[in-house]
Image: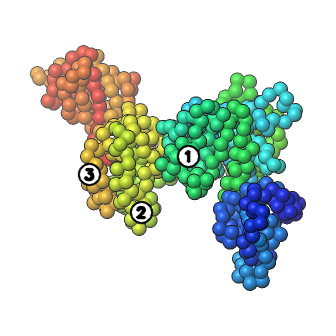
Amino acid sequence: MVSSERRKDANQINDEKSGNETSGQKATVIEFPSALSVRELSDLLKVSPVDIIKRLIRAGIMANINQVIDFKTAAAIAADLGFEAHLSKHVAGANAHLSEANKQSAQKADQTTGLLPRPPVITIMGHVDHGKTKLLDAIRSSNVVDSEAGGITQHIGAYQVDFNGQKITFLDTPGHEAFTAMRARGAQVTDITVLVVAADDGVMPQTLEAIDHARAAGVPIVVAINKIDKPGANPDRVKQQLAEVGLVVEDWGGDTVSVPVSAKDKKGISDLLENLMVVAELQDLKADPNKPAEGTVIEAEMDRTRGALFTVLVSSGTLKVGDMIVVGENWGRVKAMFNDAGKRVKKATPSTPVEVLGLSNVPGVGDVMTVVEDEKAANAAIEKRHHEIELETAVARTVSLSNVFDQISKGKVKELSIILKTDVQGSIEPIKTSLEKLSSDEIKVRVIHSSTGNVNENDIMLAIASKAVIIGFNTEAEPGAKGAAEREGVSLRFYNIIYNMVDDVTKALKGMLTPTFVEVIDGHGEVRAVFTAGKKEKIAGVFMTEGKVTRSSSMRVLRGKQKVYEGPISSLRRFKDDVREVASGFECGIGVDSFTDFQVGDGLEFFRNEKSG
């Protein structure tokens, strides 16, 4: 039951009616039990739980979707929506056991696990120049306390604001690239994504990318339609464009919350914060503040005067000054902590970001922080983490078109996630539809991101984070992306005929796909001298400029832009010794049985063919 200490009197809800009842119009009579949950009230009134929670929050009642409320409060909500509530013994008999079960279950969970409500963690994303930074500034400045009259002070990449006595944590990240990079490291720190769309510009390429990245992460999206103050603002056009990509806002009959705002004039900021609290209440976010702290690194640097500093977002437990911590492969003791205003703090509770001093080395963004008892426990935790990383890496590299059938058979994969890259926009929809139609009862095929252009490193990062395969149509991979895919084991497939693409995915799902081979570049070298060995053989004196060459490598000889030879290596030597491998920065001698026309200045490219996913 909602405590009377946490709310205003239920009669105040009636004072905030939205005008649903008109004079002379008889309200619809509905019967309620003496107590029921927000979800049950939503079902009885046939309105969205979001609308119920909004009205409760406005009345000072912080209730999630499973929270039990009394008849008086429910009746006030019903009256606000144009209903006349009566207490019914019949309805009470039918629903009271459900409400009581919800109540007892929630109380039992809190008693056994110590879970308590925690602030939501919000990430703001969107297209460049749509006002993400100004919106963050507007939110932050609207919560500046009197003691900070000189302006806004922010020292770390996250901060908290207070709204109606409740805290909200914002991550000030560069965009969806950083958001997905953290997911790729195994860190899922965001609870809600705010998608900023300019009312005078509409949905743009980076808007679509942000939507796909948020969907892939499985977090709710709240749309902030910004720049409503501008003369060319057209919020309805934005809503139409969002609907076209499957993001239907509430006032168009969908379930996506949208709020018109002006970061410049600071209009709609309170409405946005209120809606964020509503979405957070629906998620029922909780954590145990009484256990040893855990968290995720969201920023790190080496300060010239203070040494290694990192910002951690505490996910559970309470971090205190003096705690011994393990962060990635580093350990140390917390010497000092600073909040987003640069002030020293002694502790940090769940969903609180703090800057920490106490490590000798700078950790990596996305590293997990845990509190341990002593140095022995710290070393054991680091060893355990090494093992976990090895396992995670192995798992991350298992999903490909070549082995997806085995993964389905073992029950390890229920969804095949695909990143689709095409040469033109018109190809996306028919290909996406064709691929997603291949879904079955055993596995769902889902295109989590689609766009035009070559496969880039951001696509690789999203594939790692989402365990997705990348399919290209009439396109190719950028050099950096190709290298990253090889290192991380991301599956790349390229096609120029839609039928072949669909056929390969179909065969993969049925376990009938024939493996293909791709070329992997291992290194490059330059011919610095040419030596005679025997009557006909020539040996190239080579300096390795990049990567490596192995005894089993194939070699391509390039004279300017012209290829003059391609084939296997017959001999690889360092001085007079046969060797298996020569790395970058070293010299070696290379011989080829069927080619003797080496010239000083020739470029050499060493490669191998590898089975592709």
Is disc 3 surrounded by few (<14), some (14 to 19) or many (20+) residues within 10 Å?
few
Quadrant position of residue 41: bottom right
- Residue picked out by circle 1: 239
The kind of secondary structure element at disc 2 is loop
Residue 505 x, y percent position in the rendering? 32, 55
- Residue picked out by circle 3: 499
Q: Nearer the viewer, mark 1 or mark 2?
A: 1
Residue 563 x, y percent position in the rendering? 21, 25
Give the mark, 1 or 2, whose residue is nearer the N terminus: 1
Give the mark, 3 or 2, whose residue is nearer the N terminus: 2
- Identify which residue is drawn at 58% across, 51% down: 249
Regarding residue 335, the answer to whether it shows in the image is no
Q: Nearer the viewer, mark 3 or mark 2?
A: 3
Q: Amino acid at mark 3?
A: Tyr
The kind of secondary structure element at disc 3 is helix
Give the mark, 1 or 3, whose residue is nearer the N terminus: 1
- Left or right relative to 581: residue 281: right
| Residue nearest the observer in this picture, 233 or 28 | 28
Disc 3 from disc 2: Cα separation = 21 Å
Is disc 2 surrounded by few (<14), some (14 to 19) or many (20+) residues within 10 Å?
some
| Residue nearest the observer in this picture, 124 or 480 | 124
Is disc 1 surrounded by few (<14), some (14 to 19) or many (20+) residues within 10 Å?
many
User: Please, is residue 340 above or below residue 584 in the view?
Assistant: below
- Identify which residue is drawn at 34% across, 30% down: 523
Q: Nearer the viewer, mark 1 or mark 3?
A: 1
Which numbered disc covers residue 443?
2
Q: Are marks 3 and 2 in contact (CB under 8 Å)?
A: no
